[in-house]
Amino acid sequence: MTRHDDETRLRHMLEHSVEAITLCANRERADLDRDRLLNLSIVRLLEIIGEAANRISLPTQQAHPEIPWLQIVELGLTMRPFRTR
């Protein structure tokens, strides 16, 4: 794995995080239940973020211990069943 790969994955994580935050702006929790498209979009963005985090190299993860890598990966994995509802 190259540093370039990690940089690309980190950029994807950031871009998808910003997109999820933007989609949730001025929304309430109940909107996720009412708006199927919003729900699916947020779930998929969280999956992508988790997948990217899972592929970040160990040296990069160790260089950034302030980032909860395992929790991000687990969140992405947790979202998979919600896509099939």
Image (tube, grey):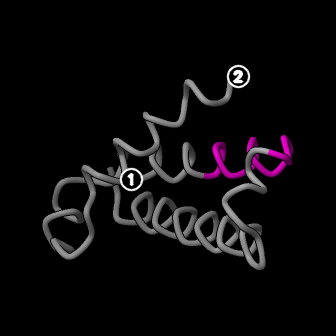
Residue 40, image x and y in percent? 75, 41
Residue at 57% across / 62% down in the picture?
A: 12
Residues drawn in magenta: 34-45
Q: Secondary structure at mark 2?
A: loop
Residue at 73% across / 50% down in the picture?
A: 32
Q: Secondary structure at mark 1?
A: helix
Q: Which residue is mark 2?
A: 85
Residue at 13% across / 65% down in the picture?
A: 62
Is residue 69 shown in magenta?
Answer: no
Quick one: quadrant of the C terminus?
A: top right
Note whether 59 is above or below 25 in the view shown.
above
Left or right of 70 on screen, residue 80: right
Q: Quadrant of residue 36?
A: top right
Is residue 40 shown in magenta?
Answer: yes
Residue 74, image x and y in percent? 34, 41
Q: Which of pointers 2 and 1 lies earlier in the amino acid sequence?
A: 1
